[in-house]
Amino acid sequence: MAGIEVREASAGDESAWRELWDGYCAFYETVVPPEVTAATWRRLLEPGQPMESLVAERGGEVVGFVNYVLHPSTWATAETCYLEDLFVSPAVRGSGAGRALIEAVLERARSAGWDKVYWHTREDNARARALYDSLAKADDFVRYVAGGG
Ligand SMILES: CC(C)(COP(=O)(O)OP(=O)(O)OC[C@H]1O[C@@H](n2cnc3c(N)ncnc32)[C@H](O)[C@@H]1OP(=O)(O)O)[C@@H](O)C(=O)NCCC(=O)NCCS
């Protein structure tokens, strides 16, 4: 991960973050309404909101992000972290940005004492799963979704 720096997103990252977000939505073949993207960006930066974005920078350019959400749990007193979105610019993939982003969230979990970090991906997302398999164990839960997009 030489040359990759991970830090909290800040207001000045908005246009780079939005460009990556558009790429992420296209990857998932989904359209997020502009007002939802605007609210998401605002809430990711707002102190006190249980969601945050970290960005990966290389050579002064923002090349990836990870967005995560903290929530309480009935199974632990400490907060649980749901890693919701991870994306690296196609041109930069394979240079360690994805690993650096996810490791930064795991490091935060350790230092803040979060109960656990969990995330989903599509079964056939081989590239993401190669990374995830090196960091955590997939379990045998199946996701059900009612309502929403
Ligand atoms: C998944 C993703 C975030 C990985 O980001 P990245 O910056 O390319 O990842 P890294 O360079 O840190 O590589 C991490 C691992 O991915 C795997 N990998 C990297 N390049 C790969 C390639 N061309 N083909 C297959 N696997 C590859 C390797 O296992 C690598 O392990 P290593 O660190 O031991 O070399 C990125 O490919 C991406 O944005 N994909 C589209 C969006 C997506 O799938 N997001 C996750 C949805 S849950």
Image: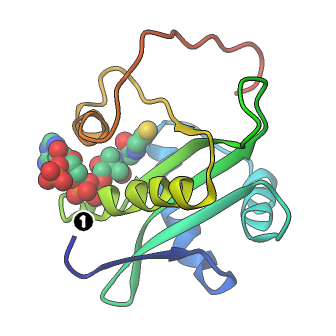
Q: The C terminus appears in which quarter of the rendering?
A: top right
Seen from this angle, which residue lies furthest bottom?
60
Q: Position of residue 122 (x, y in %)?
A: 40, 25
Q: Is residue 11 above or below residue 74?
A: below
The residue positioned 60% from the left and 63% from the top of the image is: 53
Q: How many marks?
A: 1
Q: Quadrant of residue 145?
A: top right
The residue positioned 56% from the left and 38% from the top of the image is: 116
Image side of residue 73 versus residue 86, left or right: right
Image side of residue 139 versus residue 10, left or right: left
**Image coloring type:** rainbow
Image side of residue 26 versus residue 46, left or right: left
Q: Quadrant of residue 50?
A: bottom right
Q: Is residue 122 above or below residue 146?
A: below
Q: Is residue 77 above or below residue 41?
A: above
Q: Residues within 10 Å of mark 1 (few under 14, many from 20)?
A: few
Q: Which residue is mark 1?
A: 91
The residue positioned 51% from the left and 54% from the top of the image is: 110
Q: Position of residue 32 (x, y in %)?
A: 67, 45
Kind of residue indicated by mark 1: Ala
65 or 147, nearer to the observer: 65
The residue positioned 25% from the left and 66% from the top of the image is: 92
Q: The N terminus appears in which quarter of the rendering?
A: bottom left
* Disc 1 element: helix
Q: Position of residue 61 (x, y in %)?
A: 39, 84
Q: Position of residue 13 (x, y in %)?
A: 58, 80
Image side of residue 111 versus residue 97, left or right: right
